[in-house]
Amino acid sequence: MPDRFYLLTDSLNRLTILKATEDSLRLTKQSKVSYWLDQLLSPAHQSEFIQSLLLIVLSTLFAYLLLQRRKRIQTVDHLQAQALHFAAFALFALASKGVFFIVASLSLAGILSPGSYGQLYWLGWQISLVWFVYCSFMFALGFTRSRKSYDLFFAVGLALVFLIISGLYNEWFWKWLLYKLGVVDIDPIFIDKPIVSLAPPFPIGTELLIPQISVFSLVALGAHFTLSLLLFGYAAYLIFRRARIYQDESAKRAAYLLSLSFLLMALLGLYSLLKFRSDLPALASNSYLAALVLSVIFFLSVRNTYRHGRYRRA
């Protein structure tokens, strides 16, 4: 049985090398941009590419619409304008996930340094999903405050926690940067490799996921999903409690829907927390679709709450 396993492994490695050689030969016969587009539009990666484009366009549009709403209520309610500012930044954070995917894909087509794929991929992950949690929670706090804003020290302290999580996520990036600056010698896995060694078409799934080689990244993932569960759950409770004081039925329904959207995001955090140790590749590959769904749900619930000034009726 072990012999059969090793034979199968060896056969797969040979097929991978043959595929890499074939794609490298193709790369010499066409431009890098053309090769990059061919890979993105291939059946293996087309869905991630389309989802990334939708994420960029829709999240940016949604953020712009919320910023326009913020301008209209700025003179009427300064605290609610601040809350909408955080809501817009939460959507911009989600849009960055699509941007970083497209930029990272350039590195594996040889347009950028091939070894930068992992750094760019995880930089996009932490900016989009980690800071979406922070900005969304700060929106919820701003929305539920009637006369007094959230405590500034609390906001800064929570931001520092998220900065630490971001730093742990990007351990690979710091090691790679220190190596490039000539400060330290690191494991060869962090060093730029020829395009052939990455076996194009480029690996979106499991090959370059940092948590497979970094304990710090596993800690960051666990802290990230735990905070999303706790903070979104608490935000859902705060918004639900505020909704109960509204006498206007349309305002009450809008606030209840907003509370429900935060509850759904908390449940998604719980699912991610349970899933990331058992099937991280699937969680990573589905994160683009999850971010797109989060963007739509978050925008529609926030927009519905602020229509016709319903949030102000109590």
Image (cartoon, rainbow, N blue to C red):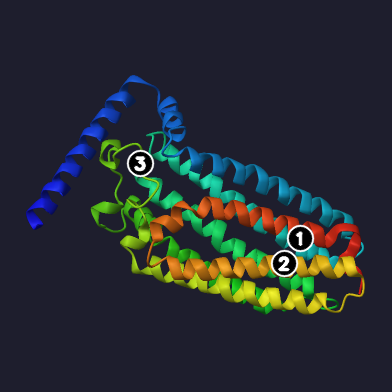
Who is closer to the viewer here, 47 or 102? 47
Residue at the top extreme of this rendering: 29
Which of the two discs, 3 and 1, labels the residue nearer the N terminus?
3
What is the secondary structure assignment of the residue under circle 3? helix
What amino acid is at disc 3?
Pro
The residue under label 3 is: 114
Q: CA distance from mark 3 to mark 2?
A: 38 Å
Residue 9 in the figure: left or right of residue 197? left
Residue at the front extreme of this rendering: 1
Q: CA distance from mark 3 to mark 1?
A: 40 Å
Who is closer to the viewer here, 122 or 257? 257
What is the secondary structure assignment of the residue under circle 1? helix
The answer to whether residue 291 is above or below residue 161 is: above
User: Quarter holding the N terminus?
Assistant: bottom left
Residue visible at 11% across and 47% down? 7
The residue under label 1 is: 302
Residue visible at 27% across and 36% down? 196
User: Quarter holding the C terminus?
Assistant: bottom right
Query: Is residue 79 something one can see in this rendering?
Result: no
The answer to whether residue 201 is above or below residue 4 is: above
The residue under label 2 is: 139
